[in-house]
Amino acid sequence: MKEHRSLRQMVTLLAGNFFGAFGSGMLGFAIGLYILHRTGSALGMGVNMMVGPMVAVVLTPVVGYIVDTRSHKAIMISAQIGTSIGLLAFAVAFARWPQAYYAELIVLQIILTVTDRFLSTALSASLVTLFPGDQLQRVNSLNQSVLSTAQLLSPMIGAVVYTFISIGAFALVEIVFELLTLACIVQLRFAPAPAAPEASAAAENDAPVPAANRVPAEKESMLANFRAGLRYLRQNRLVLITCLFGAGVNFLFAAVNLGLPYIQVTVLKMPNTLYGLTDAGFAVGMILGGIALSLITLKQHPAIISFWSIMVLAVILMGIGIPAKLNWLMSANVVFYLLVNVCIGLLIVAINTPMNTMMQKIVPPAMQGRVFMINGTVATLLMPLGTLIFGFLFDHTAAWLLFLAAGMGTFLLALGVLLYLTRSSVLADYPVE
């Protein structure tokens, strides 16, 4: 009976995530194409991409506090309802004032960022109450495969649908998928998380706290809650290092997030359908990676696997701009970027899944809301700056040079952190079973 319930939970969770990711993927793909076609500028697209990380910084103490002190299920349901209302408002505004599309898309991005931060943080903090600890890697891996399947289908279908309906109609289609996700969330059954109030008091006094007991008191102010999260981050060297490393990598990886669509659509003049095909390569790689990780048991520390994967990804990043330099045929460009995206997708799974599983195991459940939110915010803190800088540079500098520089920077940064971790006692202090 227990195994049946766990399987039902897993299917419900995976189905909800598929619906949400598929709808969001189609909408995000359409918005990116719409802005590129209307502005023709990487900087114009970059400004829109900056909104999310900037809003996340402001939300950090609020989201962490609410997730750690309120019902996760209620938060996730409220986030889905808020998303649907925001999408409906955007569709109405776009139909009424289409000339103000850019401002309307910025407002929509803000709304979606707010609701997504609450949803994703609550979900991440809930996995330990939804599934046994020995199932976390499998759940994370299968979830990644499901999300990747949605990402595989969404750009290809989105590219076709984009030619027939407006961006406002896309928002209405997305509402349907958000409501399906909501229906799945309602079916989830959450177990209560363990609590150890004494650990919070120790944290307030800056006293060392055993990793297994670092959880907050149930009643505390938002400021105290946020400060306890910062203390935990400062005391846990492994989480702190990965957090700060994420900030540096995301700054450099803005070249990929912004440069890949720009170089294909604007520089190489790739048709929408072919761009959708290459973009689907991400999902193919992530599906393969997710399935592989769900079937194997990691022998090394998750952090080691993640950093080695980042270094391989950096090598690939160095060569992303080759087609723009060599003036290949369109068919060759499509094959090249399809293969590149498959490799990137596979490596992203090899980076994120071990790291997420590690965080869920070493961070106490009652601390996960604020720690995950702070970690995510710090990791993306430099992304707006990277997006702005690379957005300007892609409009004025050869793309292949920018990809080469970003790849080299990522490789050296990952190598430096990996050497530190392997030569210090950090990994021994935080073992992951």
Image (cartoon, rainbow, N blue to C red):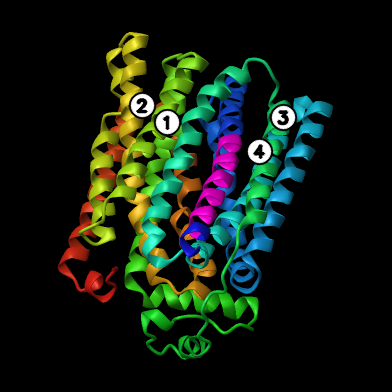
Nearest to viewer (mark 4 / mark 2)? 4
Question: Residue 199's mark?
Answer: none
Depicted 69 relative to depicted 98: above or below: below
Q: Amino acid at mark 4?
A: Phe
Q: Position of residue 132 (x, y in %)?
A: 43, 66
| Secondary structure beneath label 1 | helix
Start-end of magenta stretch:
6-24
Q: Residues within 10 Å of mark 1 (few under 14, many from 20)?
A: many
| Secondary structure beneath label 4 | helix
Front-most of 376 and 165?
165
Nearest to viewer (mark 3 / mark 4)? 4
Q: Which residue is mark 4?
A: 177
Q: Which residue is mark 3?
A: 101
Front-most of 98 and 115?
115
Q: Residues within 10 Å of mark 2 (few under 14, many from 20)?
A: many
Front-most of 9 and 205?
9
Q: Which residue is mark 2?
A: 399
Q: Amino acid at mark 1?
A: Gly
Q: Which residue is mark 1?
A: 259
- Specify the farthest residue to the right: 96
Question: Going by the image, does 136 lie left or right of 22?
Answer: left
